[in-house]
Image (cartoon, rainbow, N blue to C red):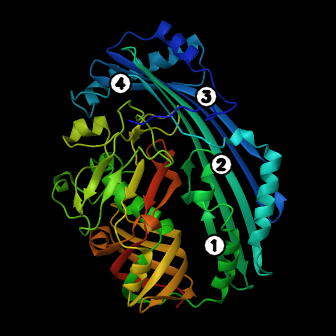
Amino acid sequence: MQCHRDSATLGAMDAALDPILTRFRSISPACDYWTLRVVATREERLAVRQDVPEPVARSQGLGAMVTVVDDGGVGYGATCDLTADGLRRAADEARDWARLSARLTLADGAPLPRLGGSGHYASPVADPWDDVPAADMLAWLAATASRLRAGEQIVDWATALYHRAQQVLLADADGHTIEQEFSWIAPTLRAVASDGTMAESRTVGGANAVRQGGLEQLDALGFPDQADRVGEEALALLAAPPCPNGVTDLLLMPSQMVLQIHESIGHPLELDRILGDERNYAGTSFVTPEMFGSYRYGSELLNVTFDPQRPEQAISYGWDDDGTPAEHLHLIRDGILQRPLGGTLSQARSGLPGTANSRACDWNRPPIDRMANLNVEPGTTPFSELVKGIEYGVLMDTNRSWSIDDSRNKFQFGCEFGRVIRYGEVGEVVRDCNYRGVSADFWRNLAAVGDADSFEILGVLNCGKGEPNQAVFVGHASPACLFSGVDVFSETS
């Protein structure tokens, strides 16, 4: 595994986590096994809206989660009181819950997650966030925002930069210690145009673009170079006709593929959801355990990987929050379903292979099965050839709305921006672009996959799941993809 260390990753935060571990070891509970996960987080958001700088938002967090395995049960205790007394209370609470839960455990004697060793991982950072003063960033955001106002009909325009730095220390009763350091960057460009009766938005970034690293990642996320285009396309949408209705070819750009992968591959393949854990909250899955190894999820062009080893992608890491080493694996190969997104505990419960994707959103939540970096691998078709192969169809870009049933099967998604394609040529802009389908059929209609030149590394900032809720980052990457026989429509045509 290629791991990186860069002292600039966390900048000024650099919380002292080792003394917390030393303190905990001195009062650690008598039990079969324990882990301590300490998380330190620092966040900052700067924004300019309508040429006015918004108040800088800053936050910090530091706390610990104690997990205890005892008498066949598992219990948790979380605390932000990191004194010896506070840690002892959390450990006692975790041990009490472990003993109470022993007779109700879902694992039923299965081996529980244990750290297999020690190590270190860090996001590679070339241009650290802390090297640029906030005043300079705000001036840069203001200059970028002014480019969004491409005409008088632009009624709202905004730019923003968000940064999160995090340290995670995971240790266990056997003396193992895993240290991981992360840095994330997420930009936003947004313009809203209105003619008094209708409003149209164009966005780059926002909730669907996040990368690991420092300010050097902004160019790859289209910031600030796409500011002019965003404003111009918002205006173009005001004058555009509605998206045509009918069953036709659909060319999805990577910014929309993010949502398509997330909702109709990622969530259905989460193993705890397949096992029923989320049924009363976020839903179940149309996927069943018997499908793995034989089910045709998509056409033979569909290859989907769990890839935690692409350093610039949002959820690359060395180990998940159970301490399982992360590795690159195929979930779908040549269209055939291979394995689910399930951590060690879900694998033990189901008897299925899985991935190192047991993740927690912060120190006050236990790990559960979550997507990490989930990617559609590039094919061999240049983007120009994707377009040339379309006699009639619609290109759609940037998610605007989504709706999907609780088994993550039937869906309806909307996009900000569209263009009609006729006889291999990209034509006029269209607005109010929507499409619908069924996951089990949609991916089988994958007709062509773009090559590496159209492959984009993006992500999601706000994936929610679990009780109590956990909102986490997710990484997605994809080329442009062509689907045949898709029901596209406009609600206004």
As rendered, which of 26 and 47 lies closer to the eye? 47
The residue located at (81%, 49%) in the rendering is 136
Residue holding disc 4: 115
3 vs 1, front mark: 1
N-terminal of the two: label 3 or label 1? 3
On screen, residue 448 versus residue 151, left or right, reads left
User: Is there CB contact under 8 Å for labels 4 and 1?
Assistant: no
Is residue 35 something that shows in the picture? yes
Residue 368 screen position, x and y as percent: 39, 40
Q: Which mark is residue 202?
A: 1
Residue holding disc 2: 215
N-terminal of the two: label 2 or label 3? 3
User: Is there CB contact under 8 Å for labels 4 and 3?
Assistant: no
N-terminal of the two: label 4 or label 3? 3
Residue holding disc 3: 62
4 vs 3, front mark: 4
